[in-house]
Image (cartoon, rainbow, N blue to C red):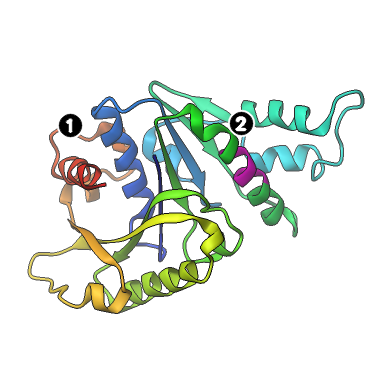
């Protein structure tokens, strides 16, 4: 199963992606591939997985894949290099796109990531993709062949309108092959009214996640340090059961 998260910046996308990975591990749904497709690259920090290489690093080192050794085919060399970009951990592997430096690197990195993901997803029971904020990843087809796209919003009109625009863009791109699109409203305080969330976005509201103090108190601690019985973990496990 491939699960991707997207939405407005600051809504907790990376936190939810990390909680999904953590909750899948607790349920012994392994092996898992965690993909950090956000140039900000924080998913590894949330999961407490240290990585040494990103796809963007590979592009930079090979000068846009033009500076490759003689005597070996480009696909063979590229596959070997990308394999080195996967950081293995207990039950979960991490693949990071990174932050491209050159003007044309984003397109190159996304094309490579998309093609490589399509090839390796069969090796994993679950794939969780943390996309960058906004809608650019969709127009570049990074979020392609997805079982569940979770559009994350906070309890604001701006967040919900962003989710609506992403949903409308997806509807115009059937080649993306996104089988299910659902809305999650995150960081909700008690008493917040969300009666119009589905009407505003045109999406099924699959989960409302509270503003958990335990996550605020984490500071720089990774999600892996959360107690197994924490409220946030329980909420995400319930979400996985719905999916």
| Quadrant the N terminus occupies | top left
Q: Position of residue 185 (x, y in %)?
A: 25, 63
Residue 42 in picture, x, y percent from top left: 45, 45
30 to 232, vertically: above or below:
above
Q: Residue at x 64, y 40 (%)?
A: 55
Q: How far across and down, in percent of the image, does residue 187 sit?
A: 22, 60
- In this picture, which residue range is highlighted in magenta? 112-117
- Secondary structure found at label 2: loop
Q: Which residue shows up at 91% across the image and 23% down it?
A: 71
**Residue topped by disc 1:** 228
Within 10 angstroms of label 2, few (less than 14), some, or many (20 or more) residues? many
* Residue 53 is a magenta residue: no
User: Taking the image as drawn, is residue 148 in sight?
Assistant: yes
Q: CA distance from mark 1 to mark 2?
A: 29 Å
Q: Is residue 169 left or right of residue 73?
A: left
| Residue 221 visible to an observer of this rendering | no
Locate residue 218, reporting x and y percent. Answer: 26, 43
Name the residue carrying label 2.
Answer: 85
Disc with the residue nearer the chain's start (1 vs 2): 2
Question: For the stretch drawn in magenta, what is the main secondary structure?
Answer: helix
Q: Are marks 1 and 2 in contact (CB under 8 Å)?
A: no
Q: In the displayed structure, does residue 7 sit left or right of residue 232?
A: right
* Vertical side of 2 occupied by 125: above or below: above
Horizontal side of residue 119 vs 159, given as left or right? right
| Image-quadrant location for residue 124 | top left
């Amino acid at each position: 199963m491939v699960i991707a998260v997207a939405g407005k910046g600051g809504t907790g996308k990376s936190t939810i992606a990390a909680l999904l990975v953590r909750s899948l591990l607790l349920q012994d749904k392994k092996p898992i591939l965690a993909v950090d497709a956000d140039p900000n690259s924080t998913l590894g920090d949330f999961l407490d997985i240290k990585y040494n290489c990103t796809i963007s690093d590979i592009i930079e080192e090979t000068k846009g894949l033009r500076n490759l050794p003689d005597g070996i085919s480009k696909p063979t060399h590229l596959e070997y290099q990308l394999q080195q970009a996967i950081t293995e951990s207990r039950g979960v592997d991490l693949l990071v796109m990174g932050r491209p430096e050159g003007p044309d690197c984003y397109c190159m990195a996304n094309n490579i990531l998309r093609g490589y993901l399509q090839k390796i997803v069969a090796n994993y029971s679950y794939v969780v993709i943390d996309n960058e904020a906004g809608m650019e990843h969709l127009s570049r087809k990074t979020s392609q062949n997805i079982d569940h796209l979770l559009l994350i919003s906070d309890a604001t009109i701006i967040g919900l309108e962003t989710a609506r625009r992403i949903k409308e863009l997806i509807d115009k791109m059937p080649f993306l092959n996104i089988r299910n699109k659902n809305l999650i409203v995150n960081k909700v305080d008690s008493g917040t009214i969300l009666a119009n969330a589905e009407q505003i976005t045109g999406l099924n509201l699959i989960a409302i996640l509270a503003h958990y103090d335990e996550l605020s108190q984490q500071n720089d601690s990774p999600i892996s340090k959360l107690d197994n019985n924490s409220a946030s973990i329980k909420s995400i496990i319930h979400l996985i059961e719905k999916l």
